[in-house]
Image (cartoon, rainbow, N blue to C red):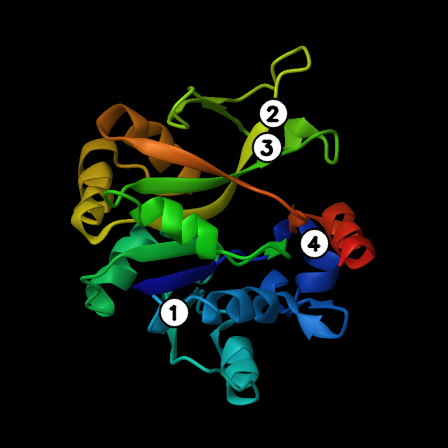
């Protein structure tokens, strides 16, 4: 199994902090966010290699970090050759680029590099592989912890299959699951990334791909328990420092 950590954004919402540094390298408790993710991935016995995909502007910053970080598993730093100045391919094209450049013919766990979480990933992988390997998205019950209008709401059926993505939070006290952008894709399904681009021509957001995928194939949701936050802006970065 391979792991892909996506660190390709340009920190537009945290510009005062990230003009010269990517969000994934912002410090929390004295360690950059990326290290929290890598340490969790390293605990997965199934993963034999970690890919970190970054944009061209911040590639050198990640290279400096990599040179000073001891990893138990090999890390391959990939420059997506985007600069944020009109040369910006989008998440799905980055994944296609990674799969082709890295010659990946294996199950793939994909994690947004802005994620901070304290839960273990082994149960997620066990669920994903189960009786048969399937597309799985890690979901999180907001439970009033964050403003739900920051995220798309994921609707699950009684078999934990994702049946819809809702742009607006539903009213009432129903569970409000959101996508964490921690995803598992079996190697037999990796070709669908390219099929999506060829048919839709869209490549920017992984949630857009998942909306398409639930109509094409089974996609299941796995609920994570514990602390999780996606560092999107200054407010969420402040929350991350407080929580972690």
Dot 4: element: helix
Between the residue at mark 3 and the residue at mark 2, the CA separation in whole angstroms equals 10 Å
Residue bearing mark 2: 176
Tell me which label, 4 or 3, sits earlier in the chain. Answer: 4
Tell me which label, 1 or 4, sits earlier in the chain. Answer: 4
Q: Nearer the viewer, mark 2 or mark 1?
A: 1
Residue bearing mark 1: 45
- Are the residues at dot 1 and dot 4 in contact (C-beta closer than 8 Å)? no
Residue situated in front as seen by the camera: 113 or 200 = 113
Q: Position of residue 218 (x, y in %)?
A: 27, 30
Dot 3: element: loop
Tell me which label, 2 or 4, sits earlier in the chain. Answer: 4
Tell me which label, 1 or 3, sits earlier in the chain. Answer: 1
Between the residue at mark 4 and the residue at mark 3, the CA separation in whole angstroms equals 18 Å
Left/right placement of residue 12 relative to residue 108 reads right
Tell me which label, 3 or 2, sits earlier in the chain. Answer: 3
Q: Residue at coordinates 62% horizontally, 55% vertically from top-left? A: 117
Q: Quadrant of residue 28?
A: bottom right
- Sort mark 1 into few (<14), some (14-19) or many (20+) by Cα contacts within 10 Å: few
Dot 2: element: loop
Residue 151, labelled with which disc?
Answer: 3
Residue situated in front as seen by the camera: 197 or 37 = 37
Between the residue at mark 2 and the residue at mark 1, the CA separation in whole angstroms equals 31 Å
Between the residue at mark 1 and the residue at mark 4, the CA separation in whole angstroms equals 35 Å
Residue bearing mark 4: 14
Between the residue at mark 1 and the residue at mark 3, the CA separation in whole angstroms equals 31 Å
Q: Quadrant of the C terminus?
A: bottom right
Dot 1: element: loop
């Amino acid at each position: 199994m391979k792991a892909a950590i996506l660190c390709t954004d340009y920190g537009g919402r945290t510009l005062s902090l990230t003009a010269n540094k990517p969000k994934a390298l912002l410090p929390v408790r004295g360690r950059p966010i990326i290290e929290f993710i890598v340490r969790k991935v390293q605990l997965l016995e199934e993963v034999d290699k970690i890919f970190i995909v970054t944009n061209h502007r911040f590639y050198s910053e990640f290279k400096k970090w990599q040179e000073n970080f001891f990893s138990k598993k090999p890390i391959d730093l990939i420059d997506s050759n985007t600069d944020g100045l009109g040369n910006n391919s989008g998440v799905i094209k980055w994944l296609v680029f990674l799969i082709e450049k890295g010659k990946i013919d294996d199950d793939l766990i994909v994690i947004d590099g802005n994620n901070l979480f304290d839960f273990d990933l082994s149960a997620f992988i066990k669920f994903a592989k189960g009786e048969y390997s399937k597309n799985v998205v890690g979901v999180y019950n907001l439970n009033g912890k964050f403003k739900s209008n920051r995220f798309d709401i994921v609707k699950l059926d009684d078999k934990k299959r994702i049946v819809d993505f809702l742009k607006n939070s539903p009213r009432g006290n129903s569970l409000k699951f959101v996508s964490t952008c921690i995803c598992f894709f079996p190697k037999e399904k990796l070709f669908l990334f390219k099929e999506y681009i060829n048919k839709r021509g869209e490549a920017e957001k992984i949630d857009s791909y998942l909306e398409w995928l639930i109509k094409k194939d089974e996609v299941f949701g796995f609920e994570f328990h514990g602390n999780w936050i996606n560092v999107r802006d200054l407010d969420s970065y402040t929350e991350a420092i407080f929580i972690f």
